[in-house]
Image (cartoon, helix red, strand yellow):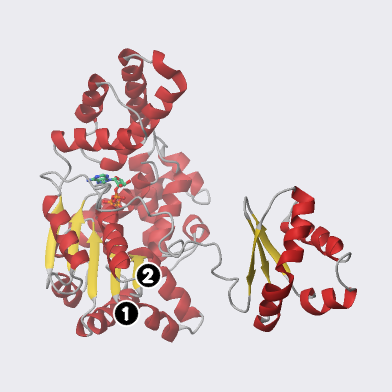
């Protein structure tokens, strides 16, 4: 009943008492009510001429009608041609939405990450003038993405007109496949090759993927030659990316590779305190120490635990005691340890990794790639779940348990012979685990 459109209809009816129907029709026929908040009513008309007339002649009548309806005074804003699109949105709302918290200010610096932090800050302060490319590597959940977004926000704040492109390695691959399929290669190229700042998260995902590597190579060269800042993150240093093209590996190493290590005890405590303070809460020292002692390798897990405890504390109010919280934390660790991924999830991740349909992996697809993906899926299920060979066979179109056994043996053999296959298994494993963090 009180949508801007409803209110506008009422305003028009009230204005009919003040002016002729022709006047109303002439100036307001294509006007639309955009919003009404505490103190402003916003109207849009597609014509600037009409906007000027409305502003100069009819705003008082609109205000009078609004006063009659709400017994309150409103400002009236009239938007003209092309003014509707960005209206009401803060200028930055469309810049990497949802990542506003990932700033340098919120990044806790300690011995384990101080080089990565300093290099990222230098790059953000003087893009393309210090380290290019900057290559940040380290294990999952240690703040690589955080630093990448922090770079993006800082550069954006100083250079609002820069085209800053953020893309994950696997999205780059998927977008490229789609662009090729739809004949939009040129569009894809322009999007990435003409960036002012190019940030790629988890670049390890493009290793071993021919067309992605080819595209990345040309993107890199174009950006580099044009003096654009390039930053990569990855879960390992370039030299350990076994399936990566040599020409990319050397380029990744041109600038500065810096690593992030798991945080030491002091940094863990600082991170936990920081997260709690930002939520306006205080954690008792023993709880703080308990978390810092028990979650040692991954900041994402630290964050998850702190969030759960804070939620728990909020729920329990003042009465929460250290024992209760400690027990809750212990239960949380137990849950995690008992957790096993399902065969569906494992097959899905293998399917994603190889870009082969899950149904083909489960079923009768016979290409070499599908057969290998299937064997790897069987191997992973055997390793990561409690399913028997027979139960695994059932997941794959009722294959016999001896087929499953031979597949697993084949993968084990391949892993010994080929570091590339071992790396694939490790990567898929990481992706599966990441779903439960
Ligand atoms: N030093 C830090 N200070 C504050 N928060 C941190 C710090 N390091 C990591 N975090 C937080 O931990 C979470 C995980 O970090 P992030 O996503 O950057 O990890 P990552 O290294 O990119 O992991 P992945 O490789 O799995 O993507 C984020 O919410 C991030 O804000």
Which residue is labeled 1 in the image? 215
Residue 423 lies left or right of residue 56; in this view the side is left
Which residue is labeled 2 in the image? 172
Residue 72 lies left or right of residue 431; in this view the side is right
Q: CA distance from mark 2 to mark 1?
A: 9 Å
Total numbered labels placed on residues in the image: 2
What x and y, as percent, mark residue 13?
86, 62
Image disc number at residue 340: none
- Position of residue 74 relative to residue 219, above or below, is above
Mark closest to the chain's N terminus, 2 or 1? 2
Q: Residue at x 35, y 51 (%)?
A: 431
- Identify the image quadrant of residue 168: bottom left
Residue 46 visible at all: no
State the SS at label 2. Answer: helix
Is 175 in front, or is 136? 136
What x and y, as percent, mark residue 137?
19, 57
Q: Are marks 2 and 1 in contact (CB under 8 Å)?
A: yes
State the SS at label 1. Answer: helix
What x and y, as percent, mark residue 356?
45, 64
Q: Residue at x 46, y 58 (%)?
A: 361
- Identify the image quadrant of residue 375: bottom left
Residue 162 lies left or right of residue 6; in this view the side is left
Crowding near the residue tagged with mark 2, few <14, some 14–19, many ≥20 C-alpha atoms within 10 Å: many
Q: Is mark 1 within 8 Å of ligand 1?
A: no
Q: Residue at x 58, y 74 (%)?
A: 83
What x and y, as percent, mark residue 303?
32, 38
Is 344 in front, or is 260? 260
Crowding near the residue tagged with mark 1, few <14, some 14–19, many ≥20 C-alpha atoms within 10 Å: some
- Position of residue 354 relative to residue 296, above or below, is below
């Amino acid at each position: 009943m009180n949508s801007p459109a409803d209110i506008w209809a009422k305003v028009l009816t009230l204005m009919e008492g003040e002016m002729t129907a022709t006047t109303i029709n002439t100036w307001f026929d294509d006007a639309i009510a955009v919003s009404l908040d505490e103190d402003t009513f916003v109207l849009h008309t597609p014509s600037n001429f009409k906007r000027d007339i409305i502003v100069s002649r009819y705003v008082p009548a609109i205000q009078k009608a609004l006063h009659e309806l709400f017994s309150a005074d409103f400002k009236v804003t009239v938007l003209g041609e092309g003014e509707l699109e960005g209206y009401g949105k803060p200028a930055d709302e469309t810049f990497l939405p949802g990542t506003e918290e990932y700033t340098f200010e919120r990044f806790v610096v300690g011995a384990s990450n101080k080089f990565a932090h300093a290099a990222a800050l230098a790059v953000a302060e003087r893009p393309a003038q210090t380290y290019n490319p900057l290559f940040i590597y380290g294990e999952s959940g240690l703040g690589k993405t955080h630093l990448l977004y922090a770079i993006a926000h800082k550069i954006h704040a100083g250079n609002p007109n820069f085209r800053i492109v953020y893309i994950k390695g696997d999205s780059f691959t998927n977008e490229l496949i789609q662009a090729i399929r739809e004949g939009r290669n040129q569009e894809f190229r322009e999007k990435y090759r003409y960036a002012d700042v190019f940030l790629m998260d988890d670049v390890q995902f493009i290793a071993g993927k021919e067309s992605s590597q080819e595209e990345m190579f040309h993107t890199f060269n174009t950006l580099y030659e044009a003096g654009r800042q390039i930053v990569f993150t990855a879960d390992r240093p370039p030299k350990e990316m076994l399936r990566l093209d040599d020409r990319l590996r050397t380029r990744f190493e041109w600038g500065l590779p810096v690593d992030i290590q798991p945080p030491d005890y002091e940094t863990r405590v600082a991170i936990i305190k920081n997260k709690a303070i930002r939520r306006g809460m205080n954690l008792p020292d023993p709880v703080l120490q308990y978390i810092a002692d028990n979650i040692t390798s991954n900041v994402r897990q630290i964050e998850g635990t702190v969030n759960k405890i804070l939620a728990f504390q909020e729920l329990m109010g003042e009465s929460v005691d250290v024992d209760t919280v400690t027990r809750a934390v212990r239960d949380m660790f137990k849950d995690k340890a008992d957790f096993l991924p399902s065969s569906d999830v494992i097959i899905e991740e293998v399917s994603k990794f190889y870009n082969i349909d899950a149904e083909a992996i489960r079923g009768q697809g016979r290409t070499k790639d599908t057969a290998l993906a299937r064997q790897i899926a069987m191997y992973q299920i055997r390793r990561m779940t409690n399913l028997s060979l027979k139960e695994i066979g059932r997941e794959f179109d009722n294959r016999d348990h001896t087929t499953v056994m031979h597949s697993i043996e084949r993968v084990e053999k391949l892993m010994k012979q080929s570091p590339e296959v071992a790396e694939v298994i490790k990567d898929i494993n990481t992706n599966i685990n990441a779903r439960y963090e």
